[in-house]
Amino acid sequence: MAQYETLGHYYDALVKDEEASRQWVDWIESFHPGRRFLELACGSGEITEMLTENHEVTALDLSQAMLERAAEKDPDKKVTFLKQDMRDLSALGQFDAIGCFCDSINYLVEDQEMRDFFKEVASHLEAGGLFLFDSHGLDRLDEFAEDYEEAGEFDDGTQVQWLISADEEMIYQDFAFYLPDGRTIQEHHMQRVYDPEDLKDWLHEAGFEVLDLRGDFGEAPLAECEKYFFACRKK
């Protein structure tokens, strides 16, 4: 089962947090990104729709289910949505700012994959353009060293079990959806947690200057945060 093809239908019911989405957008806008904004791995479009208040937004995701949810929030069709892999932006032009949020970057699990991704992003930014993203904090590996499990039921009667575990540098999320018709659909998600110093080195290698690095919107020290927030400028 492709990632998010079932989860995409229930994603907002599981994790939607309008206040947190507004925090992301306030953080983004604090760096005054330019007009043309590309959002990578846009998911269900919560942040995307808020970005249209000040930007011409192109947003891409690999999950058709996620894109459908995002498009429902954009009745005026202000966003250009694309079903596309964020690792290959060759069909796209140049942007003033590119963002990748909600730990989507952690789906890149190999060093070289991440280094190539940073270079690909840089190649689609104007000189002085911004690259804004967040990434799991190392502290999450300790948090999920003991398995975390959650269960619930959606309005349509589908039940879900959600297990999160960590091993070495990896975080695993396993979802089981028990549909009212008796079917069970499973999704397995794997993310890698990176040392922020490695990310900084690879960003510099790709031609970025790191303008700001903070934990949890600046609310936690890097050693104890859930997410690192990176603001970078193309040199």
Image (cartoon, grey):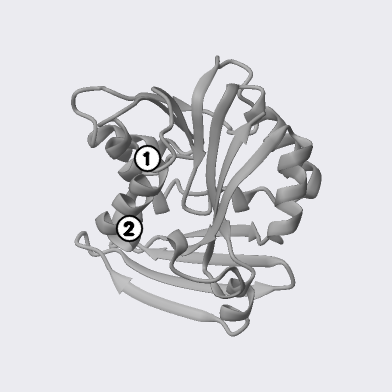
Mark 1 neighbour class, 10 Å CA radius: few under 14, some 14 to 19, many 20 or more: few
In which quarter of the view is residue 231 placed?
top right
Location of residue 61 with respect to 211 vertically, above or below: above
Residue shown at 29% from the left, 30% from the top: 52
Lateral position of residue 188 relative to residue 18, left or right: right
Location of residue 94 with respect to 162 vertically, above or below: above
Q: Nearer the viewer, residue 92 or 212?
A: 212
In which quarter of the view is residue 193 placed?
bottom right
Q: Position of residue 45 (x, y in %)?
A: 34, 40
In which quarter of the view is residue 65 placed?
top left
Q: Is residue 1 visible?
A: no
Q: Which residue is mark 2?
A: 20
Q: Is residue 143 visible?
A: yes
Residue shown at 35% from the left, 64% from the top: 182
Lateral position of residue 212 relative to residue 46, left or right: right
Mark 2: secondary structure: helix
Q: Position of residue 10 (x, y in %)?
A: 33, 55
Between the residue at mark 2 and the residue at mark 1, the CA separation in whole angstroms equals: 14 Å
Q: Quadrant of the C terminus?
A: top right
Location of residue 210 with respect to 234 vertically, above or below: below
Q: Which residue is mark 1?
A: 29
Mark 2 neighbour class, 10 Å CA radius: few under 14, some 14 to 19, many 20 or more: few
Q: Nearer the viewer, residue 79 or 32?
A: 32
Instruction: Identify the residue at the far bottom of this view.
Output: 146
Q: Position of residue 146 (x, y in %)?
A: 59, 85
In primary-sequence order, the first of circles 2 and 1 is: 2
Residue shown at 28% from the left, 62% from the top: 180
Q: Label 1 near label 2: C-beta < 8 Å? A: no
- How many marks do you count on the picture? 2
Tell me the kind of residue under disc 2.
Ala
Q: Position of residue 13 (x, y in %)?
A: 28, 59
* Number of the label disc, if any, that sits on residue 217: none
